[in-house]
Image: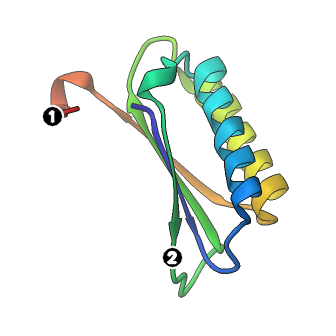
Amino acid sequence: MPIVKFFCHDPQPTAAAAETLAARVEALCRHELAASPDAIEVLLVPSLVLRGPQVLVEAHFRAQPHRGPQAVERFMDGLEEASIRHLGRRPRIRCFPVDGNALGARN
């Protein structure tokens, strides 16, 4: 964790654009959320968006004291900029800090 999912309507980005987006999101996770590189997951999920923005970003991460409102705000700013730059669309962004005690996880 963190897990960052981009739900994206067509057209899908090229492989190069998707890789550049993933690298930018990984850098944001490392710098703004202080995440360990081996814990970061970035997914691009093709979606049929019926209403609302054509890109939805969901970020789930463990709640930590250093991941307060200012860090999350900077993280969302970076996600928005990355989506506009690499997907050509302004996203709707939702962040979900998860209490580690309430998290069941494997692998």
Display coloring: rainbow
Give x and y (percent) for residue 18: 68, 55
Could you say which disc has been placed on residue 46 in the image? none
Residue holding disc 2: 47
Secondary structure of the residue carrying tag 1 is: loop
Q: Is residue 8 above or below residue 68?
A: below
Residue at 72% x, 66% y: name it.
13
Mark 1: amino acid: Gly
Q: Is residue 43 above or below residue 67?
A: below
Give x and y (percent) for residue 48: 52, 83
Left or right: 16 with respect to 96?
right
Secondary structure of the residue carrying tag 2 is: loop
* Marks 1/2: CA–CA distance: 27 Å
Q: Is residue 55 above or below residue 41?
A: below
Q: Nearer the viewer, residue 66 or 49?
A: 49
Residue at 48% x, 17% y: name it.
36
Q: Quadrant of residue 97?
A: top left
Left or right: 84 with respect to 56?
right
Give x and y (percent) for residue 1: 39, 31
Q: Quadrant of residue 17?
A: bottom right
N-terminal label among 1 and 2: 2
Give x and y (percent) for residue 52: 60, 77
Residue at 59% x, 30% y: name it.
72
Mark 2: amino acid: Ser
Q: Residue furthest bottom?
A: 50
**Which class describes the residues within 10 Å of circle 2: few (<14), some (14-19), or many (20+)?**
some
Q: Is residue 35 above or below residue 26?
A: above
Left or right: 104 with respect to 49?
left
The image quadrant where one finds the C terminus is top left
Residue holding disc 1: 104
